[in-house]
Image (cartoon, rainbow, N blue to C red):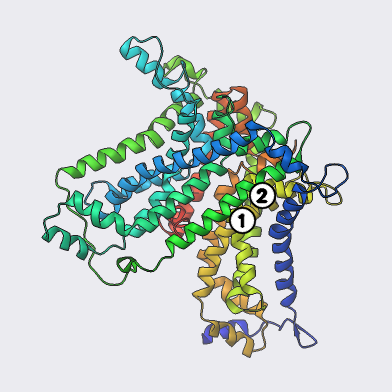
């Protein structure tokens, strides 16, 4: 402490007439937070009650939003989609989590790595890969089936409601895996031993003892998966629209057609927002229950369960899930990226680097879209870390009477789906006087707001780990809070700040749900470019661009793993 205090002593106190000028920073951070979170939400609600031209109060927007049967049907489709995807994702994730966390299944670290690979795969990349795999007639699975059986057509059709459920579940199950494995790792072996003494085998013990103890975590993961499914835009847009059915997010996108019906879109978004808020509250209530003594993490030995020969069966199941979510999709995504025509297969004369050359050097906007994504993502991550660090410090040190409310505002975007957030930003900042629609500024601000909860959770945990006495030493020597923050707190939080920056940057570079509503001709990002190429049917160029995005992300993952541990991307959602 003495060394730190001495290093801070030469700093000139930031005081003006006895008033700590660091308050200027706190006020600015609070103002920016209100601008990012409160203003778009208020404008969203107000816009839903405003007439298009006059701005007068009206309920006609709600009548228009829910006055047609197909609009209401889209809402019910979203609810069915969320339920189906969550249940299927649970069936995929829970056995995997049990095998990795509680048994002697071989290759447990490898399976965790495959779950991480699934987790970092953007949903739209997975959707494209499954279009290549299970598209009617031309899809590889159908072609292989026809070749092996001699049938006239294959049985798979990704352009269907079940197809969409499968695709979303395959890239959402890591959420349930994270919650479930985190809970199972805290279960003591003592209760399992007691069940074994009474004659229960490993499988019965798992069904009757282990999984019921982790039930709150499993239910919490199912709810998060449900919310992820109903809020997704890319996968439904690529699969549901060609299949001629709508969900809420694709219907909202159509409201932004020509002419744009922002007021109706705002009204139509309200039930989605309401369902999300309600289920997040339920999820928090479930996962914070204190009645499960074995999940407190105190005492008790934890030993892997010996499955004998069955350990290879559970490993085989893990490899089946990995084949559906990682191996098969990436094999055929790579094939398409390096193919002159993806339908011609793996022949050597079909191999080419032309697709990568085209998207990097010949396409008018593809390379720029990659640059835009990383530039906007980096700016959003930097702004997000600054804001969340400042808010976490204000909350932890109780610098203002309403500090707790500021913390709530930082995590509030978690309950706002990306498309709803984008409509709020459009309503708030697209019209004059700001007129930010289509600019880099509105995209950076939207990305920052979208991922504020990630930064805040990390910053809050880090700030709480620092003893306030270290800052008080700086204050005693005449330094301001700002000096203490700059010279003491920030150096101690380097790794945490790097982790928070990466956890915002990586998803921001591939964000589509909000970008699709806010980008302009010169601010198209790579996720929007991939979506446009999918609509045009340019799967070779699309695959090359998607792989390029993944390859550029790998160095960031490496840095994060070196600084924060192997599973840092997974742990952020178990917090």
Image quarter of residue 251: top right
Task: Say whether residue 417 is left or right of residue 561.
Answer: right
Image quarter of residue 314: top left
**Is 149 above or below relative to 450?**
above
Residue in the image at 27% along x and 49% along y: 99
Task: Say whether residue 459 is left or right of residue 448.
Answer: left
Q: Position of residue 370 (x, y in %)?
A: 62, 39
Badge 2: few (under 14), some or many (20 or more) residues near its Cα, within 10 Å?
many
Q: Position of residue 345 (x, y in %)?
A: 43, 17
Residue marked by disc 2: 421
**Is 159 above or below relative to 197?**
above
Please name whichever residue, 363 or 543, is drawn nearer the observer in this view of the structure: 543
Residue in the image at 66% along x and 53% along y: 379
CA–CA distance in space, label 2 to label 1:
8 Å
Residue marked by disc 1: 413
Image quarter of residue 574: bottom left
Q: Is residue 372 visible?
A: no
Whether the residues at callouts 2 and 1 have beta carbons within 8 Å, the answer is yes
Q: Residue furthest right?
A: 54
Does dot 2 land on a helix, a strand or a loop? helix
């Amino acid at each position: 402490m003495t060394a730190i205090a001495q290093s801070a002593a030469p700093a000139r106190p930031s005081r003006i007439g006895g008033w700590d000028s660091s308050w200027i920073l706190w006020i600015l951070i609070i103002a920016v937070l209100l601008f990012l979170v409160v203003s778009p939400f208020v404008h969203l609600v107000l816009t839903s009650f405003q007439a298009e031209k006059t701005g007068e109060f009206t309920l006609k927007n709600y009548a228009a939003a829910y006055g047609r049967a197909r609009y209401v049907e889209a809402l019910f489709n979203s609810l069915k989609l969320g339920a189906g995807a969550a249940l299927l994702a649970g069936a995929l994730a829970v056995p995997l989590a049990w095998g990795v966390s509680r048994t002697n299944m071989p290759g447990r670290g490898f399976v965790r790595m495959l779950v991480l690979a699934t987790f970092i795969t953007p949903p739209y990349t997975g959707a494209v890969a499954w279009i290549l795999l299970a598209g009617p007639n031309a899809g590889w699975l159908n072609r292989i089936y026809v070749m092996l059986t001699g049938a006239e057509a294959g049985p798979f059709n990704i352009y269907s409601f079940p197809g969409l459920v499968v695709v979303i579940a395959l890239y959402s199950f890591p959420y349930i895996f994270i919650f479930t494995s985190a809970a199972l790792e805290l279960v003591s072996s003592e209760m399992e031993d007691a069940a074994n003494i009474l004659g229960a085998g490993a499988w019965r013990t798992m069904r009757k003892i282990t999984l019921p103890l982790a039930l709150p975590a499993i239910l919490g993961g199912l709810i998060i998966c449900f919310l992820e499914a109903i809020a997704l835009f890319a996968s439904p847009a690529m699969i549901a629209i060609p299949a001629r059915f709508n969900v809420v997010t694709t219907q909202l996108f159509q409201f932004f057609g020509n002419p744009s019906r922002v007021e109706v879109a705002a009204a139509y978004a309200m039930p989605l927002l309401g369902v999300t808020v309600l289920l997040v509250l339920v999820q928090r209530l479930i996962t914070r229950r204190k009645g499960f003594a074995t999940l407190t993490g105190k005492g008790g030995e934890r030993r892997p369960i010996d499955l004998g020969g069955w350990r290879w069966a559970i490993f085989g199941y893990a490899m089946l899930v990995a084949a559906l979510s990682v191996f098969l999709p990436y094999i055929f995504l790579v094939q398409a990226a390096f193919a002159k025509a993806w339908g011609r297969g793996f022949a050597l004369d079909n191999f080419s680097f032309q697709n990568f050359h085209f998207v990097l050097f010949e396409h008018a906007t593809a390379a720029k879209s990659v640059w835009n994504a990383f530039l906007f993502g980096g700016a959003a991550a930097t702004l997000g870390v600054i804001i969340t660090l400042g808010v976490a410090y204000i909350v932890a040190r109780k610098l203002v009477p309403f500090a707790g409310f500021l913390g709530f505002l930082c995590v509030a975007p978690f309950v706002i789906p990306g498309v709803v957030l984008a409509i709020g930003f459009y309503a708030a900042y697209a019209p004059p006087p700001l007129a930010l629609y289509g600019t880099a500024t509105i995209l950076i601000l939207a990305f920052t707001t979208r991922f504020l909860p990630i930064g805040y959770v990390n910053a809050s945990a880090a700030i709480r780990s620092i003893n306030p006495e270290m800052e008080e030493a700086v204050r005693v020597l005449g330094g301001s809070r700002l000096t203490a923050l700059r010279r003491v707190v920030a150096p101690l939080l380097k790794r945490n700040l790097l982790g928070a920056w990466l956890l915002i940057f990586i998803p921001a570079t591939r964000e589509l749900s909000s970008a699709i509503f806010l980008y302009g001709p010169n601010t198209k990002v790579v996720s929007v470019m991939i979506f446009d190429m999918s609509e045009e049917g340019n799967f070779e160029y699309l695959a090359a661009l998607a792989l390029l995005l993944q390859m550029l992300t790998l160095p960031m993952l490496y840095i994060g793993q070196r600084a924060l541990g192997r599973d840092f991307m997974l742990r952020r959602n178990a917090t």
